[in-house]
Amino acid sequence: MVDQHFCTDLHAFRARPSRLPGKRAWPVPRGRRRSNAPPLPDWRIFYYLAEAAGLEVWLVNARDVKHLPGRGKSDRLDCVWHCKLNERGMLMRSFVPPEPVRDLRALTRTRARLAQDQARHQARVEKILEDALVKVSAVISDLFGTSGRRFLDALVAGERSPKALAALGDYRLKASRAKLEEALTGRFRGIHATEIAVHLRLLDAINAEIALLDEQIEQHLPAVPRTAPVCTACGEIGGGHAPGCQDLGVLLPGLAGRLDEVTGIGPVNAPAIIAELGTDPSRFPTPGHAAAWARLTSRSRQSGESAKPGRTGKGNRYLRGALGQAAMTAANTDTRLGAMYRRIARKRGKQKAIVAVSRVICEIAWILIRDPGARYEELGADYYHPRSRARQTRDKIREIERLNPGKKVILADAGPQADAAA
């Protein structure tokens, strides 16, 4: 339905492309070229076809207008009502990225789902080992690393001797040979070998598909707008420099490379963040709007004079998953984001700390997307340390008292003997 001065010409079509009129066979009225996609089980069919016809298509959420008066009781009246609301500017447009970003999003989301399947199969293998009383995952950090995979392959091949299995471990393992033999001693039977063999074959197939998807994502990234390297000195796009540029010879990273510089993001989550947030700088006015769209900001609940923070909400699960992985990676680093995580986790818990760090990473990512010349600068782990010596002393005393319950720290002036010893 195309709105043009209270246009009420309604036409119903079946939800399949073959039943829709073609671009030449169906004239588009003059005026504002905007259309409202009706609420359908799958809106993508009509959205993509109307977008291909040159229309400015808006996808709106029915939740935003269900409380407004005048809603029709049939599909036909509901379409007329939505058209009138659109003409009066009462509808809020949902975020639908352009086609190149949608294609990148399809690749990154497929990879994310394969990674989830990979984690499920790995967890199932550990469950089978627990059933066989083989506690090898307790003495090695990665069961599917080099040494862990040797153990699994040998068990599937029929090796049952703990001593022979422990000899397959890499020399870099922290666990001793005796601990490995003890962990590999159990009741591993043929049924366990059959189950693990199935999961290992599935894991190998998934790993191969993930590797292919990584190559396709890397090849598709240049087709996404505003992802190419930009020289801020001469304005050249594509990684090159103009003659006489002051930055001549400097290697310029693209958008994915600049996101990779942020602590915790990495080369896997950078394309996922680009695919979910898009590259249109006008989509979110501020980095706070991007974080709010991802549901990383708490909603306020106010009743009278009391105001309490509410839940953040669900948001985009793929974006929140990528940001959550980045936050958990940054939590183990000696950086500003790591210090922020530890600072919040001490007072409010790990889950809220992860959400807070995810919000900061989302805001940093949107700044890098909006500004092609911006680069991430690490501020260091002492970013949150107070500059006042009195505040530093107070915080350290509180930390010592927290570690020693029931005791009080009192500072006293050092005597002459202490000065001589110093």
Image: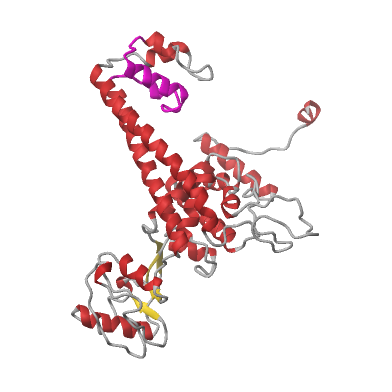
Q: Position of residue 112 (x, y in %)?
A: 40, 46
Image quadrant where one finds the C terminus: top right
Residue 191, x across and y down, in percent: 23, 21
Q: Residue furthest front?
A: 24
- Horizontal relation, residue 238 to residue 28: left or right: right
What is the x, y in percent for residue 168? 45, 14
Q: Quadrant of residue 25?
A: bottom left
**Viewer-closest of 289 and 343:** 289
Answer yes or no: is residue 194 visible: yes
Is 8 on the left-hand or right-hand side of 255? Answer: left
Query: Foreground residue, 283 or 236?
Result: 236
The furthest residue to the left: 74
Residue drawn at x 25%, y 85% as measured from the top left: 70
| Res. 75 image quadrant | bottom left
Q: Which residues are magenta?
A: 132-161
- Between 159 and 353, which is closer to the camera in this rendering? 159
Identify the residue at horizontal 35%, vertical 9% (top origin): 161
Q: Evaluate whether residue 347 shows in this view.
A: no
Task: Answer above or below: position of 32 versus 292.
Answer: below
Task: Determine if the magenta segment contains residue 319.
Answer: no
Q: Position of residue 391 (x, y in %)?
A: 64, 49
375 relative to 267, above or below: below
From the viewer's perspective, tell me whether residue 35 is left or right of residue 277.
Answer: left
Residue 301: image quadrant is bottom left
In the figure, 135 relative to 21: above or below?
above
Is residue 156 highlighted in magenta? yes
